[in-house]
Image: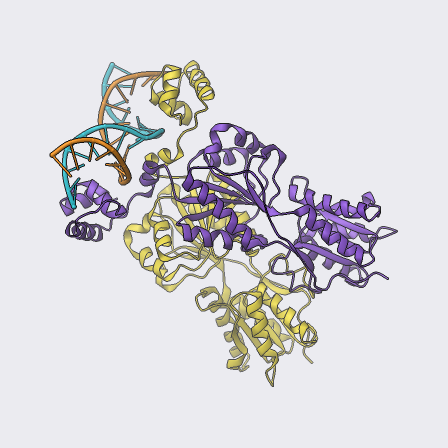
Chain colours: A purple, B yellow, C orange, D cyan
DNA sequence: CTGAAAGCGCTTACAG
DNA sequence: CTGAAAGCGCTTACAG
């Protein structure tokens, strides 16, 4: 592999000069620069990024941790992240959060990225690591996900999930629904818990009871929701509406309701969460709570870049962004 | 930041010994090891990954380039990749292919990853780079995507897209359809071109004409397909079936057909491609060509790891994996 | 089993 | 504007 030395030799200059022309920081004489440029061309030299990273102590990468690569909701968030990253001169790398604790620790400790955007819950093992002071040199912002109490000091940007779920539930109630079910995500998803809390609060405020059998785990997946919906439909006093903690589950619910020969929204109303791109295309088009995905991504990336450049002074106040109930055709008035 | 020197000092050994206990290659005396372990514990030392990468000339990362982070099709591929990667001791990083040529070049040239899995078309600028011999030290495998003629030497694993599209088209023909439309992807997507070629070949073999107005670009998106379908439906002799180059577009087609008051499959039949998880849940459940996503991911990762460990001897024969026409409920017999 | 030393390929004060 | 030199934090032959 050709190194900076080869270029220097060919150009008849020192390696310092080669380095300088590449990073054009200090002024390099125009002619010298040209000679170096030619030598680079001729040798096909390109700087060893590994050496640069090491030497500079930074990589220009921002790492984004997300729950799953194939989740359409994150398309928007990622778009927002990328647009600011490009503008600020960062590259963005992604990894899935289904990593073991060692991987997560190494992510935090290794300086392989200059900053971290967490779009997923911090794994339990990671919490401990995060709390040790010496790791606080890595700028981190949490986005979309609600912040775990154990890592309250982390900055975050997300919608008010409690309020959003309240609003969706109230919408159902205002349409005459009283038996409203909630399909939640997994236990580990705080965001889901917030949405559940909002649902319960709205029910309580309306003096409506919530039966235990109405609140089921759907694992955030289509299949999980299919199963949950099935048991909901078998209830003797079955719910007239189902609020789902994400759109995948709402789509699963729609599917299962239809399979049973029932109709949405005439027999059962459904509301989802997130407004992924499929939600408007399913039948009937799904009423759901939209998150401003792109805006979340932009804000998260903006804060990270700021923290990297200013040397980490992230405030820990959560930054709330507005949600919006998108009314389509899966909710009907209950007579 | 605490470095290996601090640990060595505290443990009363040389940095070489610290390094050795960490990487436990050579045998280190048990008691020495214990002393070092304690020193590491006390100092909170963790090796500087940037230095390690630089020194070792490798990162233990495999980079996966995909067209879009939020594309559900890749969930399966990624799952396959991750499972083999974990087994082989690699970490997997992802990035989007919407990068400019500089980024792509730097990806190839910088030794930031030990191998590259391309799940997307190589950007035009990248082709030139790839063809320069000196970059062939980075193991690369293309997966899912068809291989561009310009980079024929790259190994790949994918389904036979031509044959798959032929089969889907023949299925339509065997159901009495004669006016069959095709919604393609973008010009840059070779895979889409292959599918179009398969469609045309099947039509030709059946002596069925293909009108120019029947083949439209759908940009691989729901909205793109909505528009394409709309113009298809306005045709005086409108097609009785639409083959779409991916499921997103098929879902868009379903949606638009329904919006017009027509029914799938009674008025128009639809077939998609990929079998993403939403396809079984939309209405009617989508007939589509499934790719063995997880298997593709496994095979790609397996070949990459092999190439990394053996020192790059990738054969360039494409590895074909089987596709499968999944018959659900969007195709009806044409009377 | 362990240490002294070289060196990976850069960047960056420091002189001149 | 340019060069000589130090040094980033490791790993790894080479001796002993």
In front here: B159 or B182? B182
Which image quarter is the N terminus of chain B in? top left
Rendered residue at 80%/46% (across/down): A205
Q: Can the viewer see residue B26? A: no
Residue with the most extreme right position? A236
The answer to whether residue B87 is above or below residue A262 is above
B138 left or right of B209? Answer: left
B110 left or right of B143? Answer: left
Q: Position of residue B312 (x, y in %)?
A: 35, 46
Q: Position of residue A291 (x, y in %)?
A: 61, 53
Rendered residue at 84%/47% (across/down): A207
A35 left or right of A288? Answer: left
Residue B318: which quarter of the image? bottom left
Residue with the most extreme bottom position? B236
Q: Can the viewer see residue B250? A: yes
The answer to whether residue B63 is above or below residue A103 is below
Residue B224: which quarter of the image? bottom right
Rendered residue at 84%/46% (across/down): A209
Q: Position of residue A231 (x, y in %)?
A: 80, 50
Which image quarter is the C terminus of chain B in? bottom right
Total numbered labels placed on residues in the image: 0
In front here: A135 or A262? A135
The answer to whether residue A330 is above or below residue B52 is below
Q: Position of residue A193 (x, y in %)?
A: 69, 42
Rendered residue at 73%/43% (across/down): A197
């Amino acid at each position: 592999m050709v190194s900076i030395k080869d270029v220097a030799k060919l150009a008849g200059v020192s390696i310092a000069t080669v380095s300088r022309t590449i990073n054009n920081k200090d002024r390099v004489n125009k002619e010298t620069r040209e000679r170096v440029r030619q030598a680079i061309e001729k040798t096909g030299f390109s700087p060893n990024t590994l050496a640069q990273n090491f030497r500079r102590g930074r990589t220009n990468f921002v790492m984004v941790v997300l729950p799953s690569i194939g989740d359409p909701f994150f398309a928007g968030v990622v778009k927002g992240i990328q647009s600011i990253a490009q503008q600020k001169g960062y590259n963005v790398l992604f990894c899935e959060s289904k990593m073991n604790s060692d991987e997560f620790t190494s992510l935090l400790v290794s300086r392989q990225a200059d900053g971290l955007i967490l779009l997923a819950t911090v794994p339990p093992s990671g919490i401990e690591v995060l709390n040790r002071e010496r790791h606080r040199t890595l700028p981190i912002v949490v986005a979309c996900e609600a912040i775990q109490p154990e890592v309250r000091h982390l900055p975050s940007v997300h919608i008010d999930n409690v309020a959003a779920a309240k609003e969706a539930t109230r919408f159902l109630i205002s349409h005459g629904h009283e038996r409203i079910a909630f399909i939640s995500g997994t236990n580990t998803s705080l965001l889901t818990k917030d949405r559940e809390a909002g649902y319960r609060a709205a029910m309580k405020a309306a003096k409506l009871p919530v039966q235990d059998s109405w609140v089921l785990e759907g694992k955030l997946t289509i299949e999980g929701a299919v199963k949950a919906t099935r048991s909901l439909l078998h209830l003797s006093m079955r719910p007239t509406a189902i609020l789902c903690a994400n759109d995948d589950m709402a789509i699963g619910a729609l599917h299962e309701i239809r399979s049973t020969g029932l109709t949405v929204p005439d027999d059962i109303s459904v509301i989802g969460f997130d407004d992924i791109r499929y939600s408007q295309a399913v039948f009937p088009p799904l009423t759901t709570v939209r998150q401003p995905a792109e805006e979340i991504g932009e804000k998260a990336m903006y804060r990270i870049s700021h923290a990297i450049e200013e040397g980490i002074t992230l405030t820990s106040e959560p930054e709330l962004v507005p949600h919006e109930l998108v009314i389509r055709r899966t909710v009907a008035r209950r007579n």
